[in-house]
Amino acid sequence: MSENANLRDDSFVVAGTTYHSRLLVGSGKYKDLDETRQATDASGAEIITVAIRRTNIGQHPGEPNLLDVVPPSQYTILPNTAGCYTAEDAVRTCRLARELLDGHKLVKLEVLGDEKTLYPDVTATLEAADTLVKEGFDVMVYTSDDPILARRLEDIGCCAVMPLAAPIGSGLGIQNKYNLRTIIENASVPILVDAGVGTASDAAIAMELGCDGVLMNTAIAGAQNPVLMASAMKKAIEAGREAFLAGRIPRKRYASASSPLDGTFF
Amino acid sequence: MRIQLNGENRNIPDHSNAQDLVELLKLTDKRLAMEVNREIVPRTTFAQHQLYEGDQIEIVHAIGGG
């Protein structure tokens, strides 16, 4: 089987739906909706996160709406609970999102603990995840890179566990390769890196570790040229995935000649 | 009567229901979700959902986010 055939058949399943793109993107921080549309298109992503916020009362009628440029008919919309610092607020947000999206059950749960780090409040995350799963939501959960916690969230019934690689929006890249490896090895649900990616090589590293996918926003939207970075990320995710499937060589401290020594004439 | 809408006080006609409020705000047919006193009001029941003095109402939509 060629590499292309290998990748074309490659897919992962979240909450019963099969996805071929392993790049999930956020829709925040773009300069306008046109840039959002172009970058989202260039990323090839199938799952797009959105935030739930108060409607501007008295807004201009006919003002363009995010869901017009990333229509639910074309993408899987993943409403998030960004900005929630309590389990209760996160659950309320998910209920509103489900109503907004006509009964759509897939949500990205994040309960934050601290404004400076945006690290998850893991006890509140567990509490909210438990409530949401019991209410029938399909919960993709943002969490720290703790393998024990990842397993607890899976046991609760989350459909995907999404550990951070570095703080949200930091662009620091994959800071915790060994923890991520452990989380991936232990898991029977998809593990996606959510947060911390800065550039294409970071995305490739995450995929080389065996992650099922990577969710990012700032790394694309904050780039000098977001549309070009979206394209770069798409390729990096594919390259990293292929490298993972191909199986890398072991690391050695000393050299190993690539040209045969037999038949030398000197 | 006085309600609290998205965190701000607002006067609306007495005996309004959720559908009346949406029309008053010119949000008819917009993709939105409503919560009254922390309970979801499904869009299909707006016309039957009577509003009362002091109700706390949130109307939300989807915006860019990561």
Image (cartoon, grey):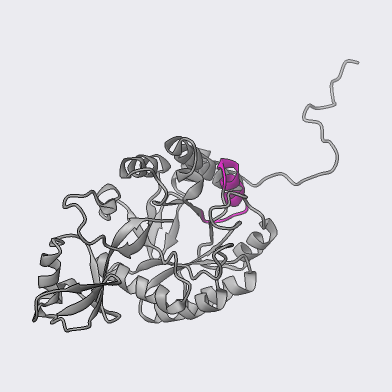
| Quarter residue A103 falls in | bottom left
Q: Residue A70, how many percent across, how many down?
A: 30, 50
Residue farthest to the top, as pictured? A265
Foreground residue among A49 and A206: A49
- The C terminus of chain A, quarter of image: top right
Q: Residue A194, how many percent across, how many down?
A: 52, 58
Q: Residue B12, how many percent across, how many down?
A: 13, 74
Q: How many marks?
A: 0
**Drawn side of residue A46 relative to residue A56, left or right:** right
Rendered view: B59 above or below A226: below
**Drawn side of residue A104 relative to residue A143, left or right:** left
| Quarter residue B54 falls in | bottom left
Rendered view: A157 above or below A206: below
Rendered view: B26 above or below A42: below
Residue farthest to the right, as pictured? A266
Specify the segment rendered in magenta: A198-213
Asked whether residue A2 appears in the rendered view, the answer is no
Rendered residue at 63%/69% (across/down): A146
Q: Residue A116, how many percent across, how many down?
A: 58, 62
Foreground residue among B1 and B42: B1
Rendered residue at 49%/40% (across/down): A223
**Drawn side of residue B44 relative to residue A81, left or right:** left
Foreground residue among A172 and A145: A172
Q: Is residue A207 magenta?
A: yes
Asked whether residue A65 appears in the rendered view, the answer is yes
Q: Is residue A178 magenta?
A: no
